Image (cartoon, helix red, strand yellow):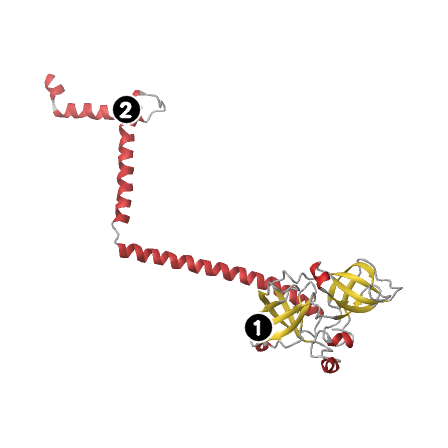
Amino acid sequence: MKDVFRSAGFKLLVALMFVMFCLMLATSNSTNSLTAKLFGSVATPMQRISTLVTNNAAATTTVGKSKEELEAENRQLQAQVDALRKKLVNYYTYQQENAQLRKFLELKNENQDFKPVSAAVVGRDPDNLFGQFTIDQGTRSGVALNDPVVTDAGVVGWVSGVSSSYSRVTTILSPETQLSAMDKVTRETGIVGCDIKSADANLLKLQYLSSDTKVAAGDLVVTSGIGGVYPRNLVIGTVKSVKRSDTDVSLYAEVTPAANVKEIRDVLVITSFAGQGEAMEAALGSSSSPASSPASSGGK
């Protein structure tokens, strides 16, 4: 009997039973058992050692790269960043162009006779009091001297200088600009112009109104089309007030421009429209300035 207890088989059986008992204790629901704590105290340091070895192996892999390999990897990443940045710029450009074209398409649909050229403002003269600016379209796109310049909001000005790929725009705030205009409510006509004082206040003047004028604050002022320089019914602005002229018995109306010419970024050049050029020869024959000549023949 003693030999049985001393045999290798019995000892192995006892060892297996002990191991099974320990496993049962370790996997039991009692998390506060002494055996679970003992197993945890052994396992936790081993996990920490394993994590440390793994992290060191990853760091060793990076450190083990040569300078040339790291530089090549950096160049590759920089190229990816540049490509993504370019795509972002293109995205915003396309987004702005689409918004602009949608607005101009509405204007084109309302005026089927218009032949428009879309342009962006690429430069401004900081010394110019009247908001003169440069656009990125010229004769290559069909732009010519005296072409009217507008936005979806209203009249901006006219092309006063042109090259193959750029054009200079003189705005409606300039004293050089005069437009034949009409009050859309009363249908009274006059000439819209500006001076330094009015330009500083961002206002226009609808001049030569009769003493019994019915023009009132809030009325919409549009182009009349007389002279063939601007199409009819382009919005100029809204009447702010009516005042008496200092030089004669007539009245004039202060007009707030519909388009903020000093802040616009995109414009539309109307290169052709029905009635364009009417009375132009007479206007140009009386003066070399396209802005002052229409005043003598009814304005732009």
For residue 95, side relative to residue 251 (left or right) = left
Q: Is residue 102 visible?
A: yes
SS label for mark 2:
helix
Q: Residue at x 80, y 62 (%)?
A: 253
Q: Position of residue 133 (x, y in %)?
A: 61, 67
Q: Which mark is residue 15?
A: none
Type of amino acid at the residue the image marks with label 2 = Leu
- Which one is earlier in the sequence, the residue at label 1 or at label 2? 2
Q: Which mark is residue 166?
A: 1
* Residue closer to the observer: 6 or 158: 158
For residue 255, side relative to residue 9 (left or right) = right
Classed neighbour count for the residue bearing mark 2: other residues with Cα under 10 Å, few (<14), some (14–19), many (≥20):
few
* Residue closer to the observer: 36 or 66: 66
Q: Quadrant of residue 144?
A: bottom right
SS label for mark 1:
loop
Q: Quadrant of residue 237?
A: bottom right
| Residue furthest front in the image | 247
Q: Which residue is mark 2?
A: 38
Q: Residue at x 70, y 62 (%)?
A: 199
